[in-house]
Image: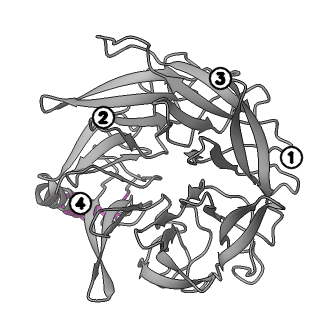
Amino acid sequence: MLRTNPQSATAKVASILLFALAVMFACSAQAQTFTVLHNFTGGADGGNPYAGLAIDSAGSLYGTTNTGGSNGDGAGTVFKMTHRNGNWTFAPLYSFMYGDDGGNPFAGVVFGPNGSLYGTTNDGGVHGDGTVFSLRPPPHACSSVLCSWTETVLYSFQGGTDGAGPYDGVVFDRAGNIYGTTYSGGTYGGGTVFELSPSDGGWTEGVIYAFSGSDGAQPISGVTVDDAGNLYGTTQLGGDYVCDGNGPACGTAFELTYSAGSGWAESFLYSFTGGADGADPYAGLIFDPSGNLYGATPGPYGAGVAGTVFKLTPSAGAWTFSLVYGFGEGGDECGPRGTLAMDGAGNLYGTTYCLGTHFVGSVFKLTHINGSWSSTTLYSFTGRSDGGYPEAGVTLDASGNVYGTTTVGGQYNYGVVFEITP
């Protein structure tokens, strides 16, 4: 991934030495904090994780891979990592078969009220347009790390008005309903927000909103739910402003509210302009304890032309946009793609896709001090044994450790699971 183009043999040697010294410096400066927990092989353990990680009360990590698996179909896996006696143990929980069970998940998994894992696949299912699934652990304690979980498909998308190709995962409301988004399909082809409601031991799917373009289009991220059951999210495209004068519209942040008399209604929180505010958000939205929302855009737009982190503040029934941070120079869509994480002190954490010292991604922290935000790079990937090009955000544990994945790199170039300790 990293190349030099020397004009002479001498320049080539010098370039190699400089790169080696840079890598040695980076590793020595950060070796006490950065650890690769697992190198994906592309085989039975999976490969190319696009999603972040879920963490349980015991500190175990759960995630998905987009490729690999034990069935030979390369349709991806769900896995678990357990921390015991100072070591991490990797266990595959399920391998997708690219059949009715789904295949190639881009989304991670979440815990449902019953302790099962829930997620989506982008492909597969009865109609080939993706699924919503659950994974149930074995009914009895299992002494082997290779104990498989049982998958149940809750819904197979048909590719029509019900939507198609979900990229992100799902969330639950207090009543146990499931919500998520599809990237395409719907009445107007711009994607949907869907609901799965428990019914007679099964699930009933309904589209609660279909994007038409001017109101947003092609949501990559899922939705966030507040205590009142309102939903919040972003669309990569659509909205009021056109990027580059003749390109697609620059994306939106939206809210969906429910009324017993009229059902669900969408309202704009913000329509991105493609200026200093950024454009084309891949990431979803998160709340802080005060009810403010935070999100990110990947670039090439923004105050620093490589993406932004932003804040939306509610006031008198409206929302006010403010720029938290603008990332500096980088390639197209090199900024943050994954949803942010926030710690108990209000600091924000995330990844960039292809920024950092070696331009193959980084992990960053944004700290709010005296009314302004400052950025710290926690780690810059090299694209080698440590991984590279992280698509997802990061997960924090109670001790402040940071966990995440990279889509490529590592020992076998199928990505890694990593940890950064404070």
Which element is circle 3 on?
loop
State the separation of the CA atoms marked 2 and 1.
38 Å
Which element is circle 4 on?
helix
Residue highlighted by disc 3: 101
Q: Nearer the viewer, residue 172 or 17?
A: 172
Which element is circle 2 on?
loop
Horizontally, residue 316 falls left or right of residue 52, namely right
Residue highlighted by disc 1: 161
State the separation of the CA atoms marked 2 and 3.
25 Å
Q: Position of residue 242 (x, y in %)?
A: 74, 80
**Callout in the foreground (4, 3):** 3
State the separation of the CA atoms marked 4 and 2.
36 Å
**Callout in the foreground (4, 2):** 2
Horizontally, residue 404 falls left or right of residue 137, namely left
State the separation of the CA atoms marked 1 and 4.
52 Å
Is the residue 89 above or below the residue 208 in the image? above
Residue highlighted by disc 4: 19
Task: Please report contact status of discs 1 and 3: CB closer than 8 Å, yes or no.
Answer: no
Choose the circle earlier in sequence order: 4 or 2: 4
Q: Residue furthest front?
A: 260
Check disc 1: other Cα within 10 Å, few if <14, some if 14-19, many if 20+.
some
Specify whether residue 101 is painted magenta: no
- Answer whether residue 41 is visible to the viewer in this image: no
Task: Please report contact status of discs 2 and 3: CB closer than 8 Å, yes or no.
Answer: no
- The answer to which quarter of the image holds residue 225 is bottom right
Horizontally, residue 397 falls left or right of residue 150, namely left
Amino acid beneath label 2: Ser
Q: Position of residue 273 (x, y in %)?
A: 65, 83
Q: Magenta span: helix, strand or loop, mainly?
A: helix
Choose the circle earlier in sequence order: 1 or 3: 3
